[in-house]
Amino acid sequence: MVPIALVNEALFYNSFESNIFFKCIHDEGVYIGYYPHIGSGDENADRGNWNSKKEYLLSMIGYAVGLGNVWRFPYLTYKHGGGAFLIPYVIMLSVAGLPLFFMESSLGQFCSQGPINVWKAVPIFQGVGITMMLVSTFVSIYYNVIIAYSIYYLFASFQEPLPWSDCSNWSDMNCNITARGSLMAVNTSMIADGNQSCLEEFLASVPLQSPSERYWDVVALQRTSSMDETGPVVWHLALCLLLGWILIAAALFKGIKSSGKVVYFTATFPYAVLLILLIRGVTLEGARNGIEYYIGSQSNLTKLSEAEVWKDAATQIFFSLSIAWGGLTALASYNKFHNNCYKDSIIVCITNCSTSIFAGFAIFSILGHMAHVYGKPVSEVAQAGFGLAFIAYPDALSKLPISPLWSILFFFMLITLGLDSQFAGIEVITTCLQDAYPKVLKAKRGLITVLICIVLFLLGLPCVTGAGIYWVNLIDTFCAGWILLVAGLLEVFGLSCIYGGNRFIKDIEMMIGTKHALFWIWWRACWFFITPVVLLVILGWSLYTFTAPTYGSVEYPQWGIALGWCMTVFCLVWIPIVAVWKLVKASGNPWQRLKSVCSPTKDWGPYLECHRNERYGQAGMNDANVYVISNKNTTNTMQ
């Protein structure tokens, strides 16, 4: 904790590669209070900074590398031609993923503000920031439910044998140890009338499920037949959900100061587990067949001619890097001003994509063994999403010697992958609130974090009822889908075309130093043309191919679909509402009003006065605490 003092003077004297000189000094005689989220060596003593570059990078990697890297990317690669899928994947990383990632992280670092306040650059688009915060809120509700599933399976793994390895006392007539979802049990009733010479038959088909499928439906979820049938709260999942929120609240109680320590474990542990699973997997019989299906000799280059392959590659890159969620901006806002955000973006994006490819080998080597055990082709056991994480892979692990050990490692890995992403999601909410009410909330950050976790826990309770999985799937479809494409498209358009791409480049150079004009050619091409076109095509294709969500063969009721669209509208409606509100508040004729709300506000620019230089001059902020800075480490120590 650090005593906060008002700035007495700002002198500049220290050299930086762009020949700009800064040094910020403050008088420690005036004390305001103690804030656990601010350290004694922080450059920004008003908001705080990361303790080190490592903590920031690990937090960003943990945020970007999530469950989708493990349970979605490997399946997409197998589905879309194996190794051939890497071609559109890398191209989409270059033209859409990396440019937007660099843009968001640079924007947050430049002004040291969260996803709402960064739009002081283009006030008419401030609703985009609200949309990002709302999406992060909705996603945080159901994402922690997935963590709760993983926690439950982790506890269930401390048994020998694993409970889903066979049809034991929890099972019913629909459980069959040889079933993989393709067989049907036919019940025939013979109804004979005493005076009739023929029998009337009717067939009731009941799908046979493997033990892991049946355990997921009957024991873990206690799933009802449809969304119309809510059912009671599944208390073991509710308790696991509570435990998940307690872990998150504890990790974020001191903001980035505490979460930055936690990520040393949560961001690195998944790599250790994936490596262990890969080593174990490749030693199993049938592993080679799984890897061949994933990315081997069966790669199909003709798949590249299909539009869906390119759409899925772009979508996976966009969502895997957590673009347009607000988290990248929020985490980067705690960087020191001269941190090299360009180098960080390259490191995080490459690490994220490499992790996806690496995870595929660990997943498909064991799925190949599972296919060998069942005597089926890999295509019949490969699944994505919940089917992979909680049915197919646990089933495969149950066939290994010392199966509880492998199961514990796998679900512990899923928990750590989920927690990292949740840390950033909650950080988006707390950062937005703190930026909106800095004087009131600065000293109450821990309390605000706990209250947010309590509220989101209560909102998540419908997701742990008998119909909970339907709610999770519904929110995922309507809140974590093409809303983000809209937000990303408006973001790149607002900064490149309205704020000005060249102006934004000069802002970045204030942080990382002046670069040669050739350095910016690719980024200008992406920000001004390539990236917006790619996002527009993906958005149009997504809307054109949209179909009502289902969970397996279960269709959603009309009221459920309508509720999903209401969530979508609720997230997006703030964009036009805020735009109209800004126009109404502005003064002058219609053209003057439009020009005013498309121009940066007077207080836009670097947060600290010592970083504003002649381009931004004196800040016009009303909050005196804006000028609160530390007397140490004000120069660039995070490059």
Image (cartoon, rainbow, N blue to C red):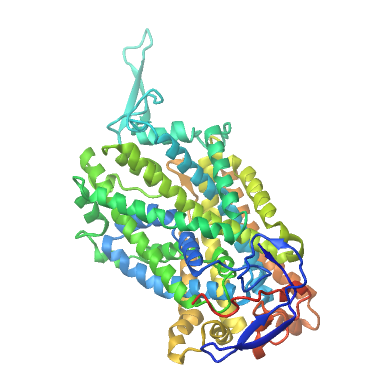
Report x, y in % for residue 20: 58, 90
Q: Residue at x 76, y 68 (%)?
A: 31
Quarter holding the N terminus is: bottom right
Residue 539, percent across and down?
49, 66
- Outermost residue toward the front? 29
- Compared across the picture, whether 423 is left or right of 363 comes to right
Q: From what the image shows, is residue 284 above or below residue 295?
A: above
**Measuring 50% from the left and 52% from the top, which residue is drawn there?**
419
- Residue nearest the viewer, comparing 340 with 41: 41
Residue at the location (39% across, 52% down)?
A: 71
Quarter where residue 493 is shown? bottom right
From the viewer's side, name the closer residue of 200 and 93: 93
In the foreground, 397 or 19: 19
Q: Height in image: 38 above or below 292? A: below
Location of residue 316 with respect to 253 vertically, above or below: below
Foreground pick, 474 / 131: 131
Residue 399 visible in the snapshot? yes
Please report the residue visible at 22 percent of the width from the left and 42 percent of the height from the top: 376
Question: How many numbered marks, from 0 up?
Answer: 0
Relative to 535, is 252 above or below?
above
Residue 166: percent from left, percent from top: 32, 29
Q: Position of residue 553 (x, y in %)?
A: 43, 41
In the image, taking residue 63 as reference, residue 609 lies left or right, namely right
Q: In the figure, is residue 72 to the left or right of 379? A: right
